[in-house]
Amino acid sequence: MPTAVAVAHPNIALVKYWGKRDAGLNLPAAGSLSVTLAPMATTTRLTWGKSSDAFTLNGRAASGRDAARLSGFLDLVRALRPDLGGAEVVSENNFPTAAGLASSSSGFAALALAATHAARVELGPAALSVLARRGSGSAARSLVGGLVRMDGGRLGDGSDAFATQVDPLTDWPLQVVIAVTTEASKETSSTDGMTLTQQTSPYYPAWVAGVEPDIDEAVEAIASRDFDRLARVAEASAMRMHACALGADPAVLYWRGATVDVIHTVRALRRQAGIPCFVTVDAGPHVKVFVLPEHVDRVNRALLEVPGVLRTILARVGGDATVRIEGS
Ligand code: PMV
């Protein structure tokens, strides 16, 4: 059996996905909008025809819940070609895993691509995005580069809930400075956090109702290369997602002290120093700061001075996921 090697980049949402309309099929309650990032990437090598599944993630064998989740995902490919048997999967991230740095987005995108190509199962871009979505909602957005829009869809089978590229952003080189505030794994997974939010936060309906208008506004802002307009809508989306999660019972709280301090620093850079920049925060304590290239150094220096910021990672807009076949 051939080995497929897939490389996918993580993405960061400008308008967030937070809530599911169907947990079984992993269908989002609304759409979302993201930017694919480089140079961060997951590289996944996969070979079918083994007696059972075996996963090595960042040099360590996966077991228990992690392995069960990955095997459950591969079952979706085995359903398309039942003679595949088990898979040997070796996957490496060149950035920290499971700390709110979007590793599931690139991880399941790379796995979907490697698993289907190694099986010679040909899926079009929409079907591939639908498959990746079953592993992780944000993974549906990591198969293509640039600015990516995820459609929440309406159909019960989820065949219309997939992501497409809106703009490669080649002439608008947005950059992201990521302030890393802990090396530890997050305490509450995004799935657990969004489920609890959905079940218990009184703000959830208002959150969902605001998502599609925010996507439209952000797409318009980007189409006119209006950074300040994008900053307002994207920062509001992140804040409202977390406000909604804080309304859960018990509260879903991902922020640490350094998270809040970085947010204040970015507001000061914007208001006092006139630097165009904005924050977004996902299901973890790190802060991602969007900025245009001419201001990266200034923002990076300011973030490194915030107590509790361990280090920063610099990212730029990334491209499409890729796959190649080795052997025969
Ligand atoms: O893809 P998941 O299930 O890990 O959920 C992602 C949730 C957020 O990162 C917080 C928001 C988003 O749209 O990526």
Image: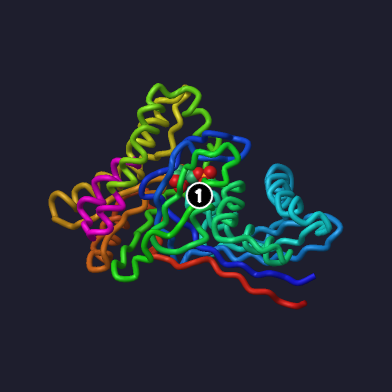
Residue 205, position as x, y percentages in the image: 40, 27
Residue lying at 55% horizontally and 56% vertically, measured from the top left: 126
Residue 208 quadrant: top left
The N terminus sits in image quarter: bottom right
Nearer-the-camera pick, 270 or 15: 15
Residue under numbered circle 1: 138
Which stretch is magenta?
A: 218-238
Magenta-drawn stretch, dominant element (helix, strand or loop): helix
Q: Position of residue 31 (x, y in %)?
A: 43, 43
Whole-percent x and y of residue 44?
64, 64
Would residue 222 be seen by someone viewing this image from the given angle? yes
**Residue at x-position 44% and y-position 27%:** 251
Residue at the image point whose x is 31% and y is 40% from the top: 213
> What is the basis of the colouring in this image?
rainbow
Q: Is residue 316 visible?
A: no
The C terminus, quarter of image: bottom right
Asked if the stretch drawn in magenta spans residue 89, the answer is: no
Residue 18's quadrant in the figure? top left
Q: Secondary structure at mark 1?
A: helix
Q: Position of residue 176 (x, y in %)?
A: 35, 60
Q: Is mark 1 within 8 Å of ligand 1?
A: yes
- Seen in the image, is 252 located left or right of residue 300? right
| Residue 253 vs residue 213, the one in the foreground | 213
Where 17 falls versus 1 (above or below)? above
Q: Is residue 221 magenta?
A: yes
The amino acid sitting under disc 1 is Ser
Locate residue 200 relative to residue 314 in the image: left or right.
right
User: In the image, is residue 121 above or below residue 23?
Assistant: below
In this view, which residue lies farthest toward the bottom? 327
